[in-house]
Amino acid sequence: MTIEQVPHWKQPSHPNFITVKTYKEGGFSQYAVSSNPIPNKTVIGDFSAATPTTEKAYSSVQVSETEHIELNSDLLYCNHSCDPNVAFDTDEGVVRAIRDIKEGEPITFNYLSTEWDMAQSFKCECGSGKCLGDIQGAKYTSSKALEGTFVNSHIRNLLARRDMGFKGL
Ligand SMILES: C[S@@+](CC[C@H](N)C(=O)[O-])C[C@H]1O[C@@H](n2cnc3c(N)ncnc32)[C@H](O)[C@@H]1O
């Protein structure tokens, strides 16, 4: 069973960039949209509020081959998209627009760019023509499917070792 986080941080945590909206009844129904137009390459946040966690969860972000963090901010509400508009750059420790984002547009990143083997998989509803369907982690995704997309170094390294036939990853 997955228990949803109750925000324990002061909201809104990123007022210039993120507005949190609710789109349906029930769980996991909140999502981040842009509060303003955001030009490509703008840094919209960082991981300064984050804390390390030993337990992977739907809410955690993988920042290295062995480390995971809880964001403790409205960045939590960035949904996954197979055609995202921001990168969670765990090497640089920032969240950056990777194209111009319109006001009110959902802010999304590719969970496969950070997560190797997710605690909680889901059927993607991003609606993109590039949608990969079941999102379980990069471990279960071909390198070809991620070609040309932003992927963090820990995932690139793991994919390379997997593709060379290393076991136990
Ligand atoms: C970090 S949360 C994102 C915020 C979440 N929507 C909420 O209300 O807490 C990750 C969870 O959101 C849902 N989610 C995120 N992106 C999704 C997508 N593209 N399609 C379907 N569900 C998604 C999944 O349940 C996933 O485990």
Image (cartoon, rainbow, N blue to C red):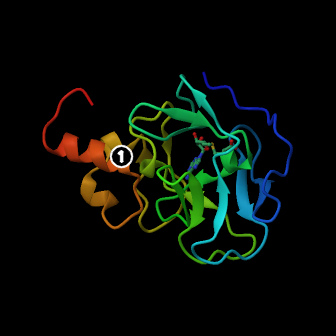
The residue beneath circle 1 is 155
Whether residue 24 is situated above or below residue 33 in the rendered picture = above
Quadrant occupied by the C terminus: top left
- Is the CB atom of the residue marked by disc 1 within 8 angstroms of ligand 1's nearest atom? no
Q: Is residue 86 visible?
A: yes
**Picture quadrant of ligand 1:** top right
Q: 163 above or below 8? A: below
Query: Which residue is outermost to the left?
Result: 165
Label 1 neighbour load within 10 Å: few <14, some 14-19, many 20+ = many
Rendered location of residue 157, percent (x, y): 28, 46
The answer to whether residue 100 is left or right of residue 82 is right
Is residue 24 rendered to the left or right of residue 165? right
Across and down, in percent, residue 79 comes to 61, 52
Q: Nearer the viewer, residue 42 or 98?
A: 42
Quarter the N terminus occupies: top right
Residue at image coords 58%, 35%: 69
Q: Secondary structure at mark 1?
A: helix
Residue found 63% across the figure and 65% down from its top: 43
Please state if 71 lies on the left or on the right of 19 as rendered: left
**Where in the figure is residue 39, as x and y percent of width and height?**
64, 78
Tell me: 79 left or right of 159. Answer: right
The percent coordinates of residue 101 (x first, y second) are 64, 74
User: Is residue 58 in view from this perspective?
Assistant: no
* Amino acid, disc 1: Ile
What number of labels is visible?
1
The residue located at (58%, 27%) in the rendering is 53
Residue 38 higher or lower than 93, as above or below: below
Give the vertical position of 162 relative to 95 (above or below): above
- Examine the image and state in which quarter residue 146 appears: bottom left
